[in-house]
Amino acid sequence: MADGKRLKELKKGVDREKLYAIDEAVKLVKGGAKAKFDETIEIAINLGVDPRYADQMVRGVCALPNGTGRTVRVAVFARGAKADEAKAAGADVIGAEELVAEVQGGNISFDKCIATPDMMPLVGRLGKILGPRGMMPNPKVGTVTMDVAEAVRGAKGGAVEFRVEKAGILHAGIGKASFTETALVENIKAFADAVVKARPSGAKGTFVKRIALSSTMGAGVKVDTATLIGAGAAAAQ
């Protein structure tokens, strides 16, 4: 499909072959976000891994220092005192068997869910529903935990989960176009650092191959990885 006139105009101001320093890339992407809504600023990282192999899977969670700019509705599968903790921390939906039944019935009124370990036999029934949506609780990213209060605060405050896709590419939203350039750069650096720290044991050669930024409706801008995570980390052998 041909690009619309607006996107073509935006692309005119971006050199498709150039690798931009992170500050300059953010300025270009933010400046090109001219939609009538507050566009999400997105990052795409091409990694030197093959996620078909367990020892090359990359996943984790990053607490963005300036949040995501999104209002996140959080559900917690818990009982008793842990349910009370979740409510006090600001969870939007809390329950056990009844919440499982709601989800099975197609009522998913949340964006992220957290569960205490004892609830996982119940929550496991929802794998086919929550899994494809990327919402299944997982201890590796801190969403299966006894510290539900901290998990809820993290989800509400800007914690972003990431998982590499089949093609070795990782996508995430790291802020809004209304954020300052400084806030966006801080978020991007924190996210990139979290990804580098999540490097799996099976990754060989260059780990971070390419990075690009874009807004929801804007043109993509290629980033010079050395200005974001350092040449050493990007090309670690």
Image (cartoon, grey):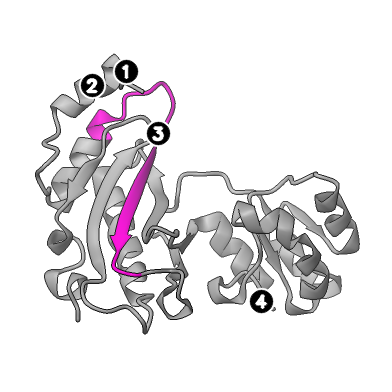
Amino acid of disc 4: Thr
Residue nearest the viewer, comparing 90 with 32? 32
Q: Quadrant of the N terminus?
A: top left
Gap in Å between the C-alphas at discs 3 and 2? 18 Å
Q: Is residue 91 visible in this depiction of the protein? A: no
| Label 1 neighbour load within 10 Å: few <14, some 14-19, many 20+ | few
In the structure shown, which secondary structural element does the residue marked by tag 2 occupy? Answer: helix
Which residue is the site of mark 4? 145
Q: Pointer 2 and pointer 4: residues touching (CB < 8 Å)?
A: no
Which residue is the site of mark 3? 39
Q: Pointer 1 and pointer 4: residues touching (CB < 8 Å)?
A: no
Circle nearer the N terminus (2, 4): 2
In the structure shown, which secondary structural element does the residue marked by tag 4 occupy? Answer: loop
Gap in Å between the C-alphas at discs 3 and 1? 17 Å
Gap in Å between the C-alphas at discs 2 and 4? 47 Å
Q: Residue at x 21, y 42 (%)?
A: 221
The segment highlighted magenta reads 30-49
Q: Position of residue 32 (x, y in %)?
A: 25, 29
Circle nearer the N terminus (1, 4): 1
